[in-house]
Amino acid sequence: MVSENTGLETLQDIRKMMERSSRFISLSGWSGVAAGTSALAGAFFARKAIADYYHNYDAGGAGCADCLAQTLIRIAVIVFITALVSAFLFTWFRSRREGVAFWGSAARRLLWNTAIPMAAGGVLVLRLISLKMYLLIGPVSMIFYGLALINGSRYTLGEVRYLGYSFLILGLISTWFPGETLYFWAFSFGILHIIYGISMWWKYERIPVRVIS
Amino acid sequence: MKNPIEHLNKVFDSRIRLGIMSALMVNESVNFNELKELIDATDGNLATHLKTLEEHHFIKVQKGFIGRKTNTVYSVTKAGEKAFKIHLEALEKMIRSIG
């Protein structure tokens, strides 16, 4: 005789199996916090570099716009690598702690589906740099990152989708405020990542879970 | 009222077979090792249950190679999808009728 409990348990088993086999759920909240922190640090240095440039310029010195662009690109590359490496590490630690596989078809699909919009955005940003259309770099990076998150959200924690929407909307709005791009950028890549990271940590990692199998 | 339990499929009575079907329902295909890791069963045990599902034509098997290693990939058939959905609906009805 099948009792109420086994029926319910069976349904829960099915749901768990569907989630575990199709989504990469080890994504750590700390990854978001780390990415956000490096973005904020990068934005701080970028702001300083820009301020120095205008200070020099106003003082009558010959401003070297190409030097400024190079400094900013260097900062951006360092931020991107730091964020990527730390995000990877925290997620790797989490999957080890919880004893779930890090690399599987779910991780592969997540990576592939976020990589496509990211790569397209990356190429576009490089092209904008070579065309010296610097004003559009900030919005384009936000918009494409947002699209990457929305696309990838089907393969990881569903909340990533809302982070993606926020990036997309902020990226579009920022095109109306070309002078404030850096602030939009710092808010989205910095603050939003940190808020997202902390709330995901609070929701999923605060109480350590043992994966029941 | 019809008894919903009669729609419950005996084939899906085992936790491992249920696990296999759940994983295959949401993935185009899953290979043997991934299933083993997801369900946490031994090779022999998993293989037996996969065989049962295959005999009922609920799943299809594709044997291939990655380099020299065999790579057996499983996916759900139309019949399997239908049977599993009926089973789920029966489960749902059963729980509703009690609650």
Image (tube, coloured by chain):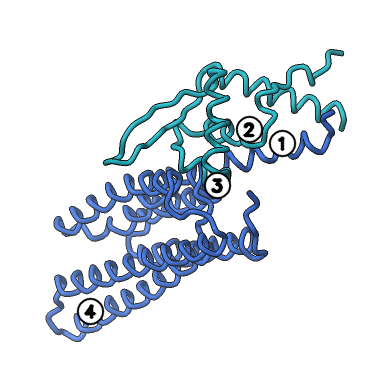
Q: Label 2: which residue?
A: B18
Q: Is residue A165 above or below residue A40?
A: above
Disc 4 residue type (three-letter): Tyr
Please tell me if label 1 and label 2 are on a single chain: no
Disc 3 residue type (three-letter): Gly
Q: Label 4: which residue?
A: A53
The reply to whether callout 1 and callout 2 are in contact (CB within 8 Å) is yes
Q: Nearer the viewer, mark 4 or mark 1?
A: 1
Disc 2 residue type (three-letter): Leu
Label 2 Cα neighbours within 10 Å, binned few <14 / some 14-19 / many ≥20: many
Q: Position of residue A59 (x, y in %)?
A: 20, 86
Q: Going 39% across and 53% down the picture, which residue do you hit? A: A171
Chain painted in blue in the figure:
A
Q: Secondary structure at mark 2?
A: helix
Please tell me if label 4 and label 3 are on a single chain: yes
- Mark number, residue A158: 3
Chain painted in cyan in the figure:
B
- Mark number, residue A10: 1
